[in-house]
Image (cartoon, rainbow, N blue to C red):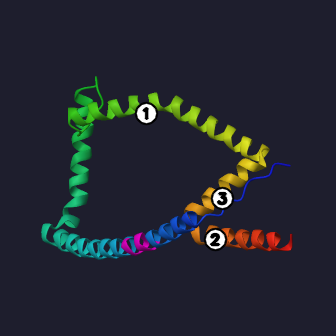
């Protein structure tokens, strides 16, 4: 059985308290930003509705769509060499570059996934790694629990020392 040393340090507890307070502050700031974004979104939605009314977009959408389809069909029949498209050459070139980049990234992503799966298997094989991972997850997500655990370990160590 592997014994792990228990670290009891006031600096660690102070750091945990700093992390907790900073996290609370960031959560408040995030909530404020979310509220502002929701207000802005509602305002934009109202303005979009008004703009659509002013431009009468709804009336012309269907007729414009059918005209564009007709133009595409005629253009495709006139030039069978290439597919008809309304996108400019720059957009088509950028899309081709994007497709090439995605194809180049696929093997790297497959390698990353394989590495991830190996790490998951290794975590299952070695319980100590699983424990360390869980401690870090707890520390990052809920530092109060880690602080409580450290306090409990400190009290337990003190009571064990007092019994001796």
Q: Is residue 158 magenta?
A: no
Residue 63: image x %, image y %?
A: 22, 57
Residue 154 image point, x, y percent: 70, 70
- Is any part of residue 84 visible from this angle? no
Q: Secondary structure at mark 2?
A: helix
The answer to whether 72 appears left or right of 17 in the picture is left
Q: Which residue is mark 3?
A: 135
Dot 3 falls on a residue whose secondary structure is helix
Disc 1 vs disc 2: which is toward the camera? 2
Between the C-alphas of marks 2 and 3, the distance is 10 Å
The image shows residue 82, relative to residue 35, as above or below, that is: above
Distance from disc 1 to disc 2, alpha carbons, whole Å, reads 42 Å
Residue highlighted by disc 2: 145
Residue 114 horizontal/vertical position (percent): 63, 35
Question: Dot 2: few (<14), some (14–19), or many (≥20) neighbours within 10 Å?
Answer: some
Q: Secondary structure at mark 1?
A: helix
Q: Earlier in the sequence, mark 2 or mark 3?
A: 3
Mark 1 crowdedness (10 Å alpha carbons): few <14, some 14-19, many ≥20: few
Residues at circles 2 and 3 in contact by the CB criterion of under 8 Å: no
The C terminus: image quadrant:
bottom right
* Relative horizontal placement of residue 76, taking residue 34 as reference (left or right): left
Which numbered circle lies on residue 102? 1
Q: Main secondary structure of the magenta part?
A: helix
Q: Position of residue 34 (x, y in %)?
A: 36, 72
Of the image marks 1 and 2, the number of the one nearer the N terminus? 1
Task: State the residue at coordinates (57%, 36%).
Answer: 112
Residue 83, quarter of picture? top left
> Any magenta on residue 27?
yes
Looking at the image, which is closer to me, 73 or 33? 33
> From which residue to which does the magenta span run?
24-29
* Residue 25 is at least partly visible in this image: yes
């Amino acid at each position: 059985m592997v014994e792990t040393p228990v670290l009891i340090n006031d600096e660690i507890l102070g750091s945990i308290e700093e992390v907790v307070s900073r996290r609370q502050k960031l959560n408040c700031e995030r909530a404020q930003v979310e509220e502002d974004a929701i207000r802005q979104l509602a305002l934009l939605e109202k303005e979009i509705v008004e703009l659509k009314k002013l431009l009468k977009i709804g009336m012309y959408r269907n007729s414009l769509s059918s005209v564009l389809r007709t133009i595409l069909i005629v253009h495709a029949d006139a030039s069978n060499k290439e597919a008809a498209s309304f996108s400019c050459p720059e957009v088509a070139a950028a899309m081709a570059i994007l497709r090439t980049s995605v194809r180049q990234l696929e093997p790297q992503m497959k390698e990353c996934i394989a590495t991830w799966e190996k790490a998951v298997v290794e975590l299952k094989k070695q319980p100590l790694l699983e424990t360390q991972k869980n401690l870090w997850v707890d520390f990052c997500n809920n530092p109060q629990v880690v602080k409580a655990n450290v306090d409990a370990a400190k009290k337990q160590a003190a009571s064990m020392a007092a019994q001796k």
